[in-house]
């Protein structure tokens, strides 16, 4: 049984309280990850503005890539913050080597990009020595659950090292175990700092706590982030990792 139905994964529906919690966790993870000093960051998370805006509010300059293939949103000439510059591009060829201090690859960017090895190699290329990348991907737990939800039992039996998952809307994403995500990052010459599920608390737990006290959200987020289930493949629909380019 799918822990979160595929139709709920856009943040709507009956699991609204869980997604409020999920988004709060993601925002706090990014806050903790961001450089302490003003830096130049590259955001390849899909052009929705959320991650770039948070980084800009912390005083960073952000290049936000709007990918032709991943967004149907109209082209915005100007960002709301003068610290954010939006550029429409298919890849990172427009950037020189070692030019940014950090890269945000949120919104499951490396799962949507099936050729993730090529994408992360480009990320490593543009990172300055000592620069870091924050990535999120679909987990194997999610991939297997979506296949089961669609009764694709043969796919489950034949799953190899790379799991490509067809979604009900016709799209295909790539799902990772923590080990596979580590291999992806180290294969690009990056040093992995940590890998963990984005969240380990279940939707039912979150709903139960928040229904009793809406002010408990901050405590829930703190509890989540103080739990350290590193490399745990048994929970979580998404994995998050931080890696750096060594000097």
Image: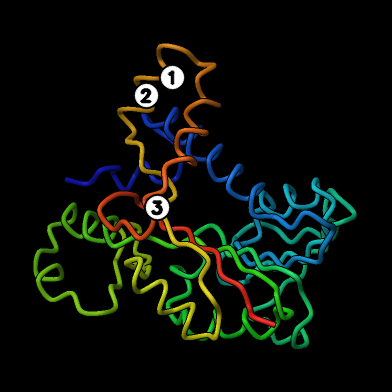
**How far separated are the C-alphas under marks 1 and 3?**
21 Å
Disc 3, SS: strand
Q: Position of residue 70 (x, y in %)?
A: 55, 66
Q: Look at the numbered discs 1 and 2 and tell me whether their residues touch, using CB distance below 8 Å.
A: yes
60 left or right of 230? Answer: right
Seen from the viewer's position, the closer of residues 54 and 222 is 222
Q: Position of residue 105 (x, y in %)?
A: 58, 65
244 left or right of 225? Answer: right
Disc 1, SS: helix
Q: How is the image coloured?
A: rainbow
Q: Which residue is at a point 43% across and 19% down the rendered structure image?
A: 210
Query: Quarter of the image holding residue 82?
Result: bottom right
Q: Residues within 10 Å of mark 3 (few under 14, many from 20)?
A: many
* Residue that label 1 marks: 210
Q: Which residue is at a point 51% across and 25% down the rendered structure image?
A: 219
21 w.r.t. 112: above or below:
above
Q: Which residue is at a point 22% across and 46% down the rendered structure image?
A: 2
* Residue that label 2 marks: 207
Q: Residues within 10 Å of mark 2 (few under 14, many from 20)?
A: some
36 left or right of 155? Answer: right
**How far separated are the C-alphas under marks 1 and 2?**
5 Å
Q: Position of residue 230 (x, y in %)?
A: 39, 56
Seen from the viewer's position, the closer of residues 167 and 244 is 244
**How far separated are the C-alphas under marks 3 and 2?**
19 Å
Most distant residue in the right direction: 82
Disc 2, SS: helix
108 w.r.t. 188: above or below:
above
Marking on residue 197 = 3
Q: Earlier in the sequence, mark 3 or mark 2?
A: 3
Which quadrant is the N terminus positioned in? top left
79 w.r.t. 99: above or below:
above
């Amino acid at each position: 049984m799918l822990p979160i139905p595929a139709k709920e994964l856009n943040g709507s529906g009956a699991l609204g309280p869980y997604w409020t919690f999920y988004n709060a966790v993601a925002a706090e993870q990014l806050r903790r990850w961001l450089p302490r000093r003003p830096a130049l960051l590259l955001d390849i998370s899909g052009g929705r503005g959320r991650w770039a805006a948070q980084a800009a509010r912390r005083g960073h300059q952000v290049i936000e890539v709007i990918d032709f293939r991943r967004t149907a949103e109209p082209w915005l000439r100007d960002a709301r913050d003068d610290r954010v510059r939006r550029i429409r591009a298919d890849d990172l060829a427009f950037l020189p080597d070692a030019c940014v201090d950090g890269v945000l690859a949120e919104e499951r960017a490396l799962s949507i990009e099936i050729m993730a090895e090529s994408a992360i190699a480009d990320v490593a290329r543009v990172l300055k020595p000592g620069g870091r990348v924050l990535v999120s991907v679909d987990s194997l737990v999610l991939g297997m659950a979506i296949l089961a939800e669609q009764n694709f039992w043969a796919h489950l039996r034949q799953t190899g090292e790379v799991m490509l998952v067809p979604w009900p809307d016709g799209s295909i994403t790539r799902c990772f175990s923590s080990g596979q995500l580590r291999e992806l990052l180290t294969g690009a010459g990056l040093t992995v700092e940590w890998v963990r599920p984005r969240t380990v608390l279940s939707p039912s737990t979150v709903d139960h706590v928040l229904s009793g006290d809406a002010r408990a959200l901050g405590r829930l987020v703190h509890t989540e982030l103080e739990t350290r289930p590193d490399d745990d493949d048994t929970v979580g629909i998404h994995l998050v990792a931080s890696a750096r380019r060594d000097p």
